[in-house]
Amino acid sequence: MNQHNLLSGLIQNKPYKKRQIRKDFLEPPLKVAGLFSGIGGVELGMSKSGHENVLFCEIDEGAKAVLSNKFKQVKIISDVRKLSKLPENVNTLTGGFPCQDLSQAGKGAGIIRGKESSLVGEVFRIVKSNSIENVIIENVPFMLSLDSGKAMEVLTSSFEELGYSWAYRVVDSACFGVPQRRQRVIFLATKALDPREILFSDVTELPILDKNSLGEFACGFYWTEGIRGLGWAVDSVPTIKGGSTIGIPSPPAICLPCGMIGTPDIRDTERMQGFPEDWTKPASRVQRNSMRWKLIGNAVTVNVFEWIGSRFRAPNPEGRNVCGWEIREGKKWPSSGWNVGEGRFGLELSYFPANFKRKPMKDWLKYPLKPLSERATRGFLSRLERSKLNFPNGFESLIRKHLVDRY
């Protein structure tokens, strides 16, 4: 069975639909402290669902400029290593960190008892020294296979040792109304509720589009690749990347049905992450404008956390109606899993909790594409010619035509 498909008969409920927050019957808002906040994707999503941001922790100067401009009343701590005591009203901690930190932290004595040198170690240090009901972590799916599953073993066993139930699920941003295929692991550890009521209660599927859809849909790909992969996406762009550490942008390319090939405007790229356009503009006051691309690529899709925040306001007991198999050590972890005190179990749950309708990407874009440069086009075409990739019919011809017509 396709890994994106829900195992037959596991959950019988209606897919998530965006709803107004009604305070007369929904759970009270969370008080949230965000670690590694970036430009506030988690925080904006949670606030849209009625939750309160109390504290940010972020070291990047450009990101801090964005946060201070968009969340003027929220305190920002620059260095997570200097953060010890959280405000008393905080009951939820959020954040993401490089998944390699799980591997680093898992060496030696472990992240709870050992030297807390990695970023994930800082998360556990703060959790141990504060009364936190919920911890929400966002990371890349690679964390499920890192070190043959040992990284997830580090994460889950550490939360279990601290008395938390946990659940996780891979979700794709494309189901939340943005034209971007961005898969991320959402991990929830909690002492307040059954985490399955948050992460597993919504299930739907997106229509599968034929990859040979040139001329019908706008298609996204990465012009920086071409030997091992194209990062191809139909009616969407592949995962938006952060670019280089010195601010060299690496936006995806888009091939319109008319044959035009170019990269999206930065304002449309912000919208692909669920932000209002020009959200990152305040960063230009303290960094080169090109660094905005890195901030966007490293961000969390706002809409994903609006969904999570909404589920915290209305947990759904139907999320408990799942069955799976026992997770065994030494192997890649499945796309979803949980432990609520009865052992670790996993299943291949749909990546798509929602299915918000949107315009086709060719109409969704508000700003003209920037034509892919001659140098970028020649370099990509050269790699494409040497590859053994099964790219869509007519794609190479369109790249050649773009080169001839433009340059």
Image (tube, rainbow, N blue to C red):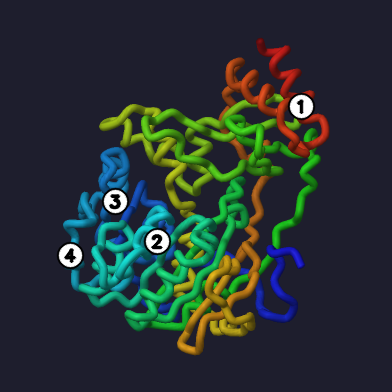
Which numbered circle lies on residue 396?
Answer: 1
Q: Amino acid at mark 3?
A: Phe
Q: Amino acid at mark 2?
A: Leu
Crowd tier of the residue under label 4, counting other residues whose Cα lies within 10 Å: few below 14, some 14–19, many 20 or above: some
The residue beneath circle 2 is 102
The residue beneath circle 3 is 71
Point 59% across, 21% down: residue? 376
Point 56% across, 77% down: residue? 328
Label 3 SS: loop
Would you place residue 39 above or below residue 34 in this image? above
Q: Nearer the viewer, mark 2 or mark 1?
A: 2
Label 4 SS: loop
- Of the pair 317 and 156, the residue shown nearer to us: 156
Q: Position of residue 225 (x, y in %)?
A: 61, 33
Residue 235 found in image quarter = top right
Q: Position of residue 200 (x, y in %)?
A: 57, 74
Q: Position of residue 170 (x, y in %)?
A: 56, 63
Residue 44 shows in the view: no
Which residue is outermost to the bottom? 342
Q: Give the Cα separation between the discs numbered 3 and 2.
A: 30 Å
Image quarter in which the N terminus is found: bottom right
Mark 3 or mark 1: whose residue is earlier in sequence: 3
Which numbered circle lies on residue 84?
Answer: 4
Would you place residue 7 above or below residue 46 in this image? below
